[in-house]
Amino acid sequence: MASVPLDGLRPEELADGFAGRVIVPGDEAYEDARTIHNAMIDRRPAVIAQCEGPADIAAALAFGRSRGLEAAVRCGGHAVSGQALVDGGLVIDLRRMNTVLVDPAARVARVGGGAVMADLDRATQPHGLATTGGRASTTGVGGLTLGGGSGWLERRFGLMCDNLLAADLVTADGRRVHASAEENPELFWALHGGGGNFGVVTEFTFGLHPLPGFSIALLLFEADKGPEALRAYRDLMDEAPDEVGGAFIYLTGPPEEFVPPHLVGQPAIGVLLTYAGDLETAKPVFRPMLGLGHAAEVITDIPYADLQCMLDDPPGFRNYWSAEYLSGFPDEAVDVFTARAKDMIVPSPSQHIAFAMGGAVAAGDHEWPVPWRSAPWAVHPFAVWEDPADDERGRSWTKAVRGDMEPWSIGAVYLNFIGDEGEDRAAAGRGAENLARLAAVKAEYDPDNVFHFNHNIRPAA
């Protein structure tokens, strides 16, 4: 560790009795430790505290507060706005706290606050169990859950926060707090969509569901089949059983063996149908999409955790995303959505996505502060590119998709899908009817708004 004071800051004082690792500028590990998913974010923290447990978190927070350092909390580092890093401040890095303990008899998993989805999925899969996660294995469990938690299994098992049974936190003043339906129930309520506003979660407890089989149909179409393919997908998903999930995706044809050469590196459409069950049971559900003249297919049983890894977002790229949640997907909206695909950056890892919601998402507990769960459809412009010269193009395309979809938007939005889009959008992610209650919880657990480097909730006065 560097011993040179940083403008009077002596981080070696934190290292005394600290079980984890303290990293500062100049250390060999610093550049890697400050790298996050979105390459557009280039922030230089003064101190990165890689914590081993709650005591380390409390010590790091006390150190930061005593020296007036802004604090950010890092798990997976996937937030598009770079919430995991703060310039000149303190990063509470939880990645060492990634243990997952599964009790298969009770169908419960206890998950460290620094775990990513791969840690959870790989631990539960040998027991034929799962819970809703995200759509990539590298996504942090913490940020995903606290924002609500949308993923491939949501139509069958609900949102990730719907499966949250309890959480243990360290508050800004170093207190350890347990939250569940029985203990600190207001805090427990706020953790279902309120984000990381109330403390650092050191451990989550999730309920698990039997998932003995999982299968997919991944169909690739030429880009000019967009309106026809999306209408067919919409009609299928509007009537599909809850076991079915997936997405309609404009993408760049990948250089995979199953992809025809004429589509590699070119605009294409991927229709992904997932099924919480074996392929033989899924085939009748998949059938309506199979007669539209697709150019390539992968139809197979696949372990759920393997699907999660197969669709990982590539690191090291520049990212700008957003979303709109829709009241429906009529033909006019289909035409507008598909027309905008031509402006996506190709070739690139960008995706122009439509998700079918409904199922257990819509049927879940509407008491939680996740007002977007009522939308039957979501549109997610996911701009990802390499060249900084494309920055304006990527941002403009994402914003244009949002503008296109506004006539059908319900207003509410999943905050994990957006960056810093202002206070109104952050409020829309929680619902106006929930804001005063969330602010009261914030005032109880973080009255000084130490945890503000997020979609922030200001404490009630």
Image: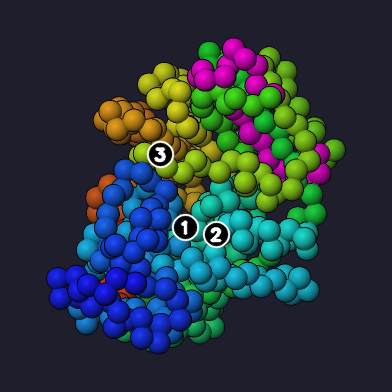
In magenta, the rendered stretch is 258-279
Which kind of residue does numbered mark 2 sit on?
Val
What residue is rendered at 25% in x and 66% in y? 46
- Estimate the x, y position of residue 8 in percent, counting from the top left: 15, 76
Asked if the residue at tag 1 contacts the one at tag 2, i.e. Cβ–Cβ closer than 8 Å, the answer is yes
Query: Is-magenta flag for residue 395?
Result: no
Asked if the residue at tag 1 contacts the one at tag 3, i.e. Cβ–Cβ closer than 8 Å, the answer is no
Q: Residue under label 2, please give it.
A: 116
Q: Secondary structure at mark 3?
A: loop
Is residue 443 visible from the viewing direction of this image?
no
Q: CA distance from mark 2 to mark 3?
A: 19 Å
Q: Residue under label 1, please give it.
A: 76
Q: Is residue 167 above or below residue 240?
A: below
N-term mark: 2 or 3? 2
Colour scheme in use: rainbow
Of circles 2 and 3, which is in front?
A: 3
N-term mark: 2 or 1? 1
Q: CA distance from mark 2 to mark 1?
A: 6 Å
Residue lying farthest right?
280
Left or right, 61 with respect to 208, comes to left
Which kind of residue does numbered mark 3 sit on?
Phe
Which kind of residue does numbered mark 1 sit on?
Gly
Q: Secondary structure at mark 1?
A: loop
Q: Is residue 42 above or below residue 217?
A: below
Q: Residue under label 3, please give it.
A: 317
Q: Secondary structure at mark 2?
A: loop
N-term mark: 3 or 1? 1
Q: CA distance from mark 3 to mark 1?
A: 16 Å
- Estimate the x, y position of residue 388 in percent, counting from the top left: 29, 33
Residue lying farthest left?
7
Left or right, 297 with respect to 27, comes to right
